[in-house]
Amino acid sequence: MSAAKGEHFVQGNEACVEGAMSAGVRFFAGYPITPSTEIAEGLAQRFKGTNGVFLQMEDEIACISAVIGASWGGVKSMTATSGPGFSLMQEAIGYAAMSETPIVIVNVMRGGPSTGQPTRASQGDVMQTRYGSHGDYQIIAFAPASVQEMFDLTLESFNYAEKYRVPAFLLSDAEVGHMRGLLSIPEHLRIVDRKEKGIKRADEAYDVPDDLVHPFPTFGKGHKAMVTGMTHSENSRIEPEDVKTHQELVTRLSEKILKNRKDINKWELVSPDSKTMIISYGASALGPKEVATKDQRVGLLRLKSLWPLPEEPIFEAASQCERILVCEMNLGMMYWPIRRIALEAGCKKIELLSKIGGEPPTPSDVRHKLRGMGAI
Amino acid sequence: MEIFDFYRKDRWPHVFCPGCGNGTVMNCFYRAFNELNLPLDKTAFVGGIGCSSRIPLYISSDALHTTHGRAIAFATGLKLSKPDLKVVVFTGDGDLGAIGGNHFINGCRRNVDMTVICINNNIYGMTGGQASITTPHDFMSTTTPYGNKEYPFDLAELAVAAGANYVARWTTRHVHELTKTMKTALQKKGFAFVEVISQCPTNFGRRNKMADPTQMLEWFKESSVRREKVRTAAVDHFDLNMAGQITIGEFVDRNRECYEELIGVEKHG
Amino acid sequence: MKPVIDKRLCKGCNVCVYICPKKCYSRGADISEMGYYTAVVSEPEKCYNHKREGKLICELCVLSCPDQAISWHPETEEELKK
């Protein structure tokens, strides 16, 4: 039963639930953790009367493992957690990347490290999302900044997870997760389903070449699929000792994402011709957006997807401005790759407005920083 | 079907050591499965990490070779997403009882319909012979070079206490009983747990004066005693310490509602 | 039926030698292609299934063999005559 079309006034986490239902999620395994618990509770209720399965597992490792197992049964599956649970899930996330299992993980980020600030926002997990598990792999991650985007980007997370057979992440935070606002569910939604082995269908996923993303051998259909986290080759030979097999496999896992950056990456621009560009994402972008909207001298590049790194829009913005201000709710994480790209693009002044403690940067904070930079 | 229609002939000879009990368990499992005429393409096999966890990859069906200790969690998701699929888990003592302990006891409690075969060789074999949570007290391993100071878990008794619908334990010396039990377990609704005490001559036997697999099999025979004959309070079992006595038999056969029944899951294809 | 050991699969563990209640097997003295001292079926006529067709009486060796190296084959004309 998908969400009712039209307008709703809901909490960010509730919008996420609706996004998942609209995508066709049929399996959720979660563990209570503030500030994500509403997502688990919401799906526990919404699955009633559908053939969706809700499980509260014994720990987050069990959650992510069950979600991966369910995906092999052929259904769209997800989990939702926050920092401490996210850390527990890293091994399995690497497994999902290696075995190319489409899954969605929602991380409603909170103050860390460790137990930190369970009820306050942060953006401290953005690097962990990309590098949390061991080894080389690429993932897809979105950063919603509103209730509407909690819906839209949850749906997109499913679409891209299915299309590229990869774990996709929704990086929300305690502010965006718990804020209330308008959600508008349109009549028509773009929904992508994974391409299945032995079946041909008109679906976006089938546009991706088979040698980049192999068709998915759903269990129970006689494919005799051999799924493993060990290094394996095309025809499912398990070859942990073979140098070439490993090179080919791990390179392909990266290529399939990096080659499709244009398709995956999403961003919003406000006054892109400004001499000063703020680059931000999620809750951190709310203050900057207000400043950029009201002051012509300042523009904003708001990243809606964080991974794969949106090199192109960052380069574009940096090459046209004189200075960049990165705003984030951590001590500087996206700042470093953004800085690298900006320097390459010829922009010499790149500064950081770093706000931790739970409150997003306010328009005052941003203006104060910009004044210090001589931008306004 | 012939044994090499059930197993992937192109992967033989398998990687298990000469005399490894895994191969014996594979024979019994094939027999049980075949005698029940179960559809192989509607059965999925899940394993964790370890020698016995590799068995699913040797079977000519869908196999999910997962992360260390988490096979039951993966299997739970797989089974509930596709309830008409039969799910069988192959795991080991360390994979199930150490790192996987939490998933093991919750799996028994939740009682999802699956068959779990734990091949207990009392050691971490694949990584070279480190002590496991079922290594008997005083026995030698690479991490207990002066004798194991700890006492072992009794995995089957844990499963009974945690609520599994069916629990049995045999050894690789008891191939007929094991085959029969596997048939029962495969047909049982709910969480069916079969523990098989099995020989690892290379990494357990060799360090404990039983380098020859036949010595280990003889040791199993001598140490085995029917559970009905020695059933005492759980706390006493710790003193029994596998080295002295292996209780074998069918421990419990009950009919608690399985998880699928409890949540009313419709069969979706 | 008589037991036959596939020498490409046998790893010379000798579990068959140990388990057979009629002592039909013995430890081998020759190295196989795979590098193992494979076991030998030294006294097949002692086997419970000797010259039997249909349901076999004992299969302890086949069930126990860790390498699936033993299988049942019907005796040859000559073997049947013995």
Image (cartoon, rainbow, N blue to C red):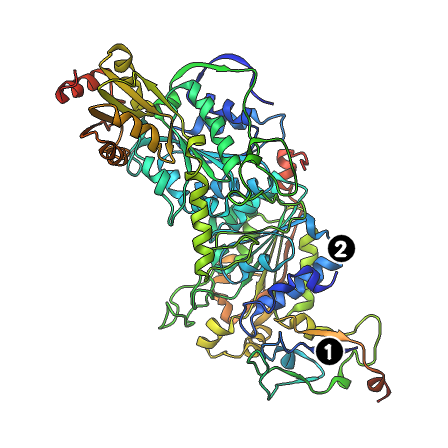
Q: Chain of mark 2?
A: B
**Residue type at tag 2:** Asn
Q: Residue at x 38, y 46 (%)?
A: A133
Q: Chain of mark 1?
A: C
| C8, C65: nearer the viewer | C8
Does C66 appear above or below A227?
Answer: below
Q: Which residue is mark 2?
A: B37
Q: Which residue is mark 1?
A: C3
Does B47 appear above or below A202?
Answer: below
Secondary element type, mark 2: loop
Q: Residue at x 51, y 22 (%)?
A: A18
The location of residue A150, given as percent across then percent down, is 43, 23
The location of residue A355, given as percent across then percent down, is 23, 27
Q: Are marks 1 and 2 on the same chain?
A: no
Q: Image quarter for residue B198?
A: bottom right
Secondary element type, mark 1: strand
Q: Residue at x 48, y 40 (%)?
A: A166
The location of residue B29, given as percent across then percent down, is 66, 61
Q: Residues within 10 Å of mark 2 (few under 14, many from 20)?
A: few
| B85, A203: nearer the viewer | A203
**Residue type at tag 1:** Pro
Q: Is there any visible trace of residue A111 in the rendered image?
A: yes
The location of residue A251, given as percent across then percent down, is 43, 48
Q: Quadrant of the C terminus of chain B?
A: top right
